[in-house]
Amino acid sequence: MTPTATRPSPSARLAALLRPAGFALAAVLLLAACSKHADPAAAGNAAAPRYAAVARGRVDIEGGLLALAMPREGVLASVAAREGETVKQDQLLAALDTRPAQLAVDAAKAQLEQAQSQLKLLDIKQAAAKQRAQRLAAAAAAGAGDGQSADDANEASNQLGAERDASQAAVDMAAQKLAEAKYELAQRSLRAPFDAVVVRVLAQPGASVSPASGPLFTLLPNKPRIVRAELNESFVGAVHPGMRAEVVANDDAENARWTARVLRVGQVYGPATLENDPQIRANARTVECVLAFDQPEQQLRIGQRVIVRFLPDGKE
């Protein structure tokens, strides 16, 4: 016997028809509420990026650190500077044994004094010879003397003049030798070329050194800090000189930050040396971008890694 099918009541059929419409209406109301309470500022920030470009960089100075080696070979007699010390321009850093060079200076001085004395003597003789030649020439013209004596006196005066010129050349040569000896004496001392901080010292009294033995001192010049950023090739067109940027430290990006401006953008592509990922470092092409801080930042250490965020034009 076939069972009789139960037909749904009219109220059940109406509820089934209204259920999908209710879900759709609820969805429309929810979207309307979300769009009504959305923050217009957040939408604007999403449309306009906060930074024009971001790059890795490191703190440096123009010209970099200065490595100084002893100009001449010898034995160190003294080391006058220590690591961490601030030195002034022309301050003595180290010196070799200067006794041989000082003896050469003394010998050159004596030679110069001898040449100068010889020149003075010839000046006196030449003046007397000129006076005698003039008197004999006047006597011969007046008939009181013979012309041969006047000619001999004039020839003697000219000969003394030639000897005087040779003596003057000897004086000049002796002065040149003295200048060379003084220069060699100065080369036995190593001095600071400008105000700086001594970063490293590799020198001890009694050690044998030479220009080929490597630097004895590494100096940090007293110059403003800069940032050398590696700008990815995709951001090169977005960065230009004068553009503002903020510099943050890698280890404290939330608190330590400084303002800077772009000084120049390089013209040569090179590898990315500051990337930690070897694959990115091998494939990425970057351009060096140099930035100067708005305020002197001596607390930053040379070689410290930073992140540079370039701000769009007109944005502070």
Image (spheres, rainbow, N blue to C red):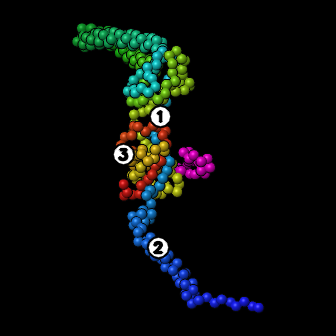
Identify the residue under disc 1. Answer: 65
Question: Do the residues under discs 3 and 1 have CB atoms within 8 angstroms?
Answer: no
Q: Which mark is residue 30?
A: 2
- Most extreme residue toward the front, as rendered? 1
Q: Quadrant of the C terminus?
A: bottom left
- Most extreme residue toward the left, as rendered? 142
Callout 3 crowding tier (Cα within 10 Å): few <14, some 14–19, many ≥20: few
Q: Residue at x 41, y 37 (%)?
A: 299
Q: Closer to the camera, 101 or 218? A: 218
Does residue 272 show up magenta in the picture?
Answer: yes
Callout 1 crowding tier (Cα within 10 Å): few <14, some 14–19, many ≥20: some
Element class at badge 2: helix
Using the numbered discs, state the Cα–Cα distance from disc 3 to disc 1 in whole angstroms: 22 Å
Type of residue at label 3?
A: Asp
Using the numbered discs, state the Cα–Cα distance from disc 2 to disc 3 in whole angstroms: 50 Å
Q: Please state the horizontal and vertical placement of residue 24, each as a whole percent of the image.
A: 51, 79
Element class at badge 3: loop
Magenta span of residues: 268-288
Q: Closer to the camera, 79 or 114? A: 79
Identify the residue under disc 3. Answer: 294
Type of residue at label 2?
A: Leu
N-terminal of the pair, mark 1 or mark 2, is: 2
Using the numbered discs, state the Cα–Cα distance from disc 1 to disc 2 in whole angstroms: 64 Å
Type of residue at label 1?
A: Leu
Q: Please state the horizontal and vertical placement of residue 209, each as a whole percent of the image.
A: 54, 20
Q: Residue at x 23, y 12 (%)?
A: 142
Residue 110 seen in the current view:
yes
N-terminal of the pair, mark 2 or mark 3, is: 2
Q: Residue at x 29, y 12 (%)?
A: 127
Q: Please state the horizontal and vertical placement of residue 243, each as a whole percent of the image.
A: 40, 53
